[in-house]
Image (spheres, grey):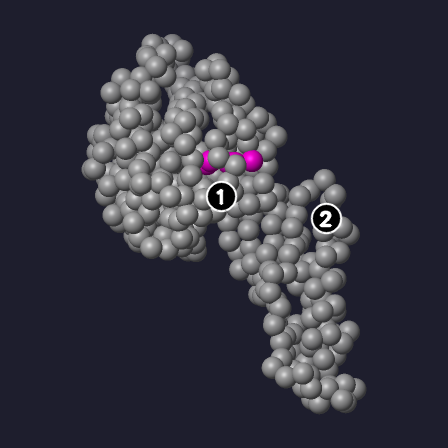
Amino acid sequence: MMSNYHEIWKSLDRHLPAALELRQRLHRQPNLSGDESITRDMVLSVLPATSTPTKVADTGAVVRVGGPGPCVGLRGEMDALPVVELTGVPWASQRPGVMHACGHDVHLAAVVAVARVLHEVGAPTPLLVVLQPREETYPSGARDIAAHGVLDVEECVAMIGAHLQPALAPGVVACVPGGVNASADEFEIRVQGASGHAAYPHLTADPVLAMSEIVVALQSIVSRSVDPMHSVVVGVSSVSAGTAANVIPGSARATGTIRALKSNTRTLVHKRVADVARHVARAHRCDAEVVITKGEPVLENDPALVGRISEHLTGQGISVSTTLRSLGADDFSFFSERLPSAMLFVGTETNEALHSAHFLPSDLDVRRTAQAMLGGYFGAADGIAQREQPDRVAEHG
């Protein structure tokens, strides 16, 4: 174990007051996706750095804390949501209709606390702070950073993220191997028929009837095409057609979402949605066009990495859960596609749901998020040390 390990953990609380003050400033001045430059600069102004920040993904940045060589990435999302805040705290959002309702202000404050303690005590392994824009919208900020090449340039060999999760009890950190967040794709189905008077349906090809049966038939995909042990959602969220009660329209449109916790299941479901829509439409003398827009891939936590992280967290008396999985999505998955990664979920004092106008994590939640991130950092640093050990043996052999 590294010589300054216990000192780093003990020093974290000393940096929390500054992190809490930063959290309130960030909460007071939220910025929407794609407009995070002010947030980025606010965080950079208080981050210790041993290199000049690299601007990426338009309004994002990465900055190194520590020396050269392989490093651990620590993600902090920056964007807020178009939500009218109803918390009533003195430091509530000063920007009408914009709010940090997903905890990104807490995540950023925790990132800064971790970076500052590692800088002060001495990072045994370099840290790469990744200030990511556009987590809440497309195009994904994580996707753009992952594709940029900066992680390769910086020799980032593992990525750590932490997210508040009201579904967990306060003080619990979920550290789960494998798929923990689903892929999230959208589909659009357009059915083309033949319009006509509603009194003479036999002279038409009714796209409303066809679409209605498509919506119902899609529900069979999960129960009859997917392994029952694999989690999947196929949901139709909007249907539109026609303008008059006595006219059968010429077309109908539906949109929805596809969620899956396994990549091969994701591919299967894409094919089945298209097949079901086209064949059901054809049975009603209509044609169906299906467009699937891919979003986030499955977020896969590296099993070896989360195993090491769990040891560090439990060693600090932190309760660890290994069961939480969600069909929600997070674009952190674009990092997990490229390098060993771990997304940790942190239980909150508040029971308010994410994205709620009343969502307001406590100061304790900032501390717990920083602890989770620090445990993630040490777990990743252990992996780097293990990887480099054979080289050291060869050098001295």
Task: From the viewer's perspective, tell me whether residue 372 is left or right of residue 14.
Answer: right
Q: Residue at x 40, y 11 (%)?
A: 1
Place of residue 26 in the rendered image (x, y in percent of width and height, measured from the top left): 30, 41
Gap in angstroms between the C-alphas marked 2 and 1 = 29 Å
Please name whichever residue, 49 or 136, is drawn nearer the observer in this view of the structure: 136
Q: Which residue is mark 2?
A: 226
Q: Does residue 387 lie above or below 34 as drawn?
A: above
Q: Which residue is mark 1?
A: 354
The quadrant of the image that shows the C terminus is top left
Place of residue 91 in the rendered image (x, y in percent of width and height, measured from the top left): 31, 41
Place of residue 394 in the rendered image (x, y in percent of width and height, measured from the top left): 39, 15
For the residue carrying disc 1, how many other residues have a C-alpha within 10 Å: few (<14), some (14-19), or many (20+)? some
* Residue 251 in sight: yes
Type of amino acid under label 2: Val
Q: Residue at x 21, y 37 (%)?
A: 45
The main secondary structure of the magenta stretch is: strand
